[in-house]
Image (cartoon, rainbow, N blue to C red):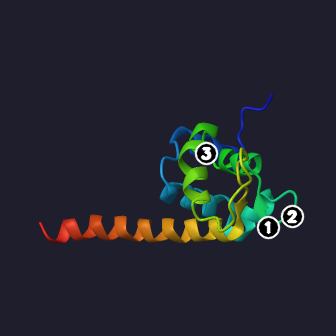
Amino acid sequence: LSRELSRGDFIRLFQSVEPINSLVEFRASLLRTYGTIEAAFECHDRSCTGALQPEDFVRLCVSLGCSSHHAQQLFYQQICEQNTQQPEPDQLPPVSFSAFALSMRHAECLGVMQWLRRHASRHWR
């Protein structure tokens, strides 16, 4: 058994130490891990339908160091609000790429607003 960690293992270990608690953190982790929103989505769209099934979405979140609880509670519901198609009764809807991309753009805007708020408060004290 080797005591050395690869760079990837080290990064995954520390991603799970600090939990992802917001859509802004989710987006940042996604971009660090996959490079682009499209690459992350395509990597987990196992059925190649342009939509992530609920279990695929949870798998994507867990790959970022997010707990499955947070994946279901915080992110899945927020992102599915952007879906244009309504699910069948008693079924969880898949996450469409357009809903996913729109939510990631929303997270980017939230991140910019957080940055502006932090910097503005420093300069206007």
Quarter of the figure that contains the C terminus? bottom left
For residue 47, above or below residue 55: below
Q: Is residue 64 left or right of residue 111?
A: right
User: Of label 3 and label 1, which has the lower sequence position?
Assistant: 1
Residue highlighted by disc 2: 48
Distance from Cα at disc 2 to Cα at disc 3: 21 Å
User: Horizontal placement of 96 versus 111: left or right?
Assistant: right
Q: Nearer the viewer, residue 100 or 80?
A: 80
Q: Marks 2 and 3: CB-CB under 8 Å? A: no
Label 3: which residue?
A: 71
From what the image shows, is residue 8 above or below residue 33? Answer: above
Q: Residues within 10 Å of mark 1 (few under 14, many from 20)?
A: some
Give the image location of residue 66, x and y in percent. 60, 44
Give percent across and percent down for residue 74.
53, 47
Label 1–label 2 contact, CB within 8 A: yes
Element type at marker 2? loop
| Name of the residue lying farthest toward the right | 47
Element type where label 3 sits in the image: helix
Farthest-out residue, front: 89
Disc 3: CA contacts within 10 A as few (<14), some (14-19) or many (>=20)? many
**Disc 2 packing (10 Å; few <14; some 14–19; many ≥20):** few
Residue 67 quadrant? top right
Label 1 residue SS: loop
* Position of residue 3 measured from the top left corner of the image (x, y, whole percent): 72, 32
For badge 1, the amino acid type reads Gly
Which of 35/57 is in front?
Answer: 57
**What amino acid type should be assigned to the residue bearing mark 2?**
Cys
Write down the quadrant of residue 9 in the picture. top right
Residue 20 visible in the displayed image: yes
Q: Which residue is mark 1?
A: 50
Q: Amino acid at mark 3?
A: Ala
Q: CA distance from mark 3 to mark 1?
A: 19 Å
